[in-house]
Image (cartoon, rainbow, N blue to C red):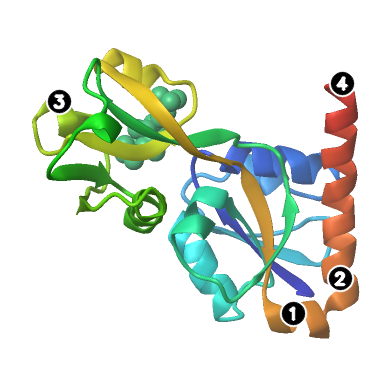
Amino acid sequence: MSLSVALTKGRLEKAAVAMLEECGYGVEKLKDKGRALAFEDTLKDIRYFLVKANDCITYIEHGVADIGIVGKDTLMEGGSDYYEMLDLKFGQCRFIVGGMKGCDPLKKSGHIRIGTKYPEVARQYFASRGMDVEIIRIDGSVELAPVLGLCDGIVDIMETGKTLKENGLEVYDTVARISARLIVNKASFKLKRDEVMNFITDLERIVNRNAEGNQ
Ligand code: PRP
């Protein structure tokens, strides 16, 4: 196969496959995949595989994948040995600081505890504000942590805002806007430059077309 492409499972998967289909790639098998995790393009010389977001960076950094599609949230949290080439503009959401209604953790004095799946993003955000906080790593259902008293606030992803609202939390600040990004293995960028650039150009065309459609 000329190119190996790591796609992030879950939230970004459907939009990524839809974009590849719009580019004219043979991704039918990815739409009706059952439990399979690796697929060959029926039209192009490309192999796709589906991985967890953090693992997408690992596969890219180890050169197993040439190209990866992954959220900016994951890129902000860790890994740096890749080229970030394109903002794909789907999977748009925000990193936010949240807390219980009426209890802004940013206004709390003394010891502050922050629950998050993204300790590095949280650490950098609070350090930039000169706030010394205790970061508590949580793997999921982050909105529950302040409700149960594990922490005073959270740093988490917000897409629709429903999870926050339905658990009695509100947003107190935006840390960063995030969306899906295309990343490239550094060696592949040199050794497979034409194939990589053709792939990027195809996706970029769709990103620009969608942006024009939204104007
Ligand atoms: C993410 C995030 C929030 C939720 C936000 O969790 O951590 O909990 O989605 O989405 P919303 O603003 O549209 O409500 P995810 O669904 O990935 O599940 P998790 O809690 O198991 O990590």
Q: Marks 4 and 2, how far apart in space? A: 31 Å
Q: Which mark is residue 147?
A: 3
Q: Which mark is residue 166?
A: none
Tag nearer the camera, 1 or 4: 4
Counting other residues with Cα less than 10 Å from the Cα at mark 2, is it few (<14), some (14-19), or many (20 or more)? some
Considering only order in the chain, which callout, 2 or 1, is on the residue closer to the N terminus?
Answer: 1
> With respect to residue 184, does 54 lie above or below?
above
Considering only order in the chain, which callout, 4 or 1, is on the residue closer to the N terminus?
Answer: 1
Tag nearer the camera, 2 or 3: 3
Element under disc 3: helix
Element under disc 1: helix
Viewed as shown, does residue 6 lie left or right of 124? right
Element under disc 4: loop
Q: How many marks?
A: 4
Considering only order in the chain, which callout, 3 or 4, is on the residue closer to the N terminus?
Answer: 3
* Residue topped by disc 1: 188
Tell me the amino acid under the disc marked 4. Answer: Gln
> With respect to residue 127, does 142 lie above or below?
above
Q: Marks 2 and 3, how far apart in space? A: 50 Å
* Residue topped by disc 4: 215
In which quadrant of the rendered image does the N terminus lie? bottom right
Task: Please report the residue visible at 75 percent of the width from the left and 58 percent of the height from the top.
Answer: 41
* Residue topped by disc 2: 195
